[in-house]
Amino acid sequence: MQDREDEWAALMRAANVGDPAAYRRLLQGLAPVLRSIVRRGFARVGMTSAGEVEDVVQEALLAIHIKRHTWDPSAPIGPWVAAIARNKLIDNLRRRKQGVEVPIEEVADSLPDGAKGEELSGREIDRLLAVLSEGQRAVVRAVSVEGASIQETARRLGMSDGAVRVALHRGLKALAARFGRVGE
């Protein structure tokens, strides 16, 4: 194992200074390992598609190519490669948004009857949201109160999608901490 790690590190160093043959050998050596990591990851979630495995392996190899300058030559290369493979696997699974489908007839008896609890007035909502920063308040109001999507909110407030998600998470966390969690 250590021999393989040392060989990969030497090949990556050579590739990073412009040796195409070393780079080709490195990628050829990494591909079966990436394939194994991805195959195990898919197996953990009940998937076995060889085509999907190859797609993720190719994405990981491309990411290694693009990010090879970020590898620290004093650090082991194996964990760096494995992290890239896991991240690409996770990206693939997120893109799928694979969910479980259950026919409604099988769970109809366990669903709530649809009767809603007390609705909060606009004044009460304003009072609750007043504990948040202005940015968090705007995001929580847009997404949680008005029902806007993350993308709509980001566009309306001139923020990135990620910034909206962070503000929403932090705002809801602050509200839960201040007022207690409902239903727990």
Image (cartoon, grey):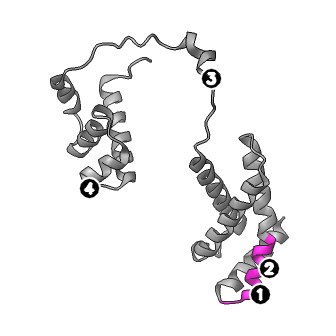
Measured Cα–Cα span from mark 4 to mark 1: 47 Å
Is residue 141 visible to us here?
A: yes
**Residue drawn at x 66%, y 90% as measured from the top left:** 18
Over which residues does the magenta segment extend?
A: 18-29
The single residue placed furthest to the left in the displayed view is 123
Query: Which residue is disc 1 drawn over?
Result: 21
* Nearer the camera: disc 4 or disc 3: 3
SS at mark 3 in the image = loop
Q: Earlier in the sequence, mark 3 or mark 2?
A: 2
Circle 4 residues within 10 Å: few <14, some 14–19, many ≥20? few
Measured Cα–Cα span from mark 1 to mark 3: 55 Å
Circle 1 residues within 10 Å: few <14, some 14–19, many ≥20? few
Where does residue 4 sit, x and y in percent of width and height? 82, 70
Q: Amino acid at mark 3?
A: Pro
Q: Are marks 1 and 2 in contact (CB under 8 Å)?
A: yes
Residue 81 sits in quarter: bottom right
Q: Amino acid at mark 4?
A: Gly
Q: Nearer the viewer, residue 98 or 89?
A: 98
Q: Earlier in the sequence, mark 4 or mark 3?
A: 3
Q: Earlier in the sequence, mark 1 or mark 3?
A: 1
SS at mark 2 in the image = helix
* Nearer the camera: disc 3 or disc 2: 3
**Residue drawn at x 61%, y 16% as measured from the top left:** 105
* Nearer the camera: disc 1 or disc 3: 3
Measured Cα–Cα span from mark 3 to mark 2: 50 Å
Query: Which residue is disc 4 drawn over?
Result: 158
Q: Which mark is residue 25?
A: 2
Query: Which residue is disc 3 drawn over?
Result: 103
Q: Earlier in the sequence, mark 4 or mark 2?
A: 2
SS at mark 4 in the image = loop
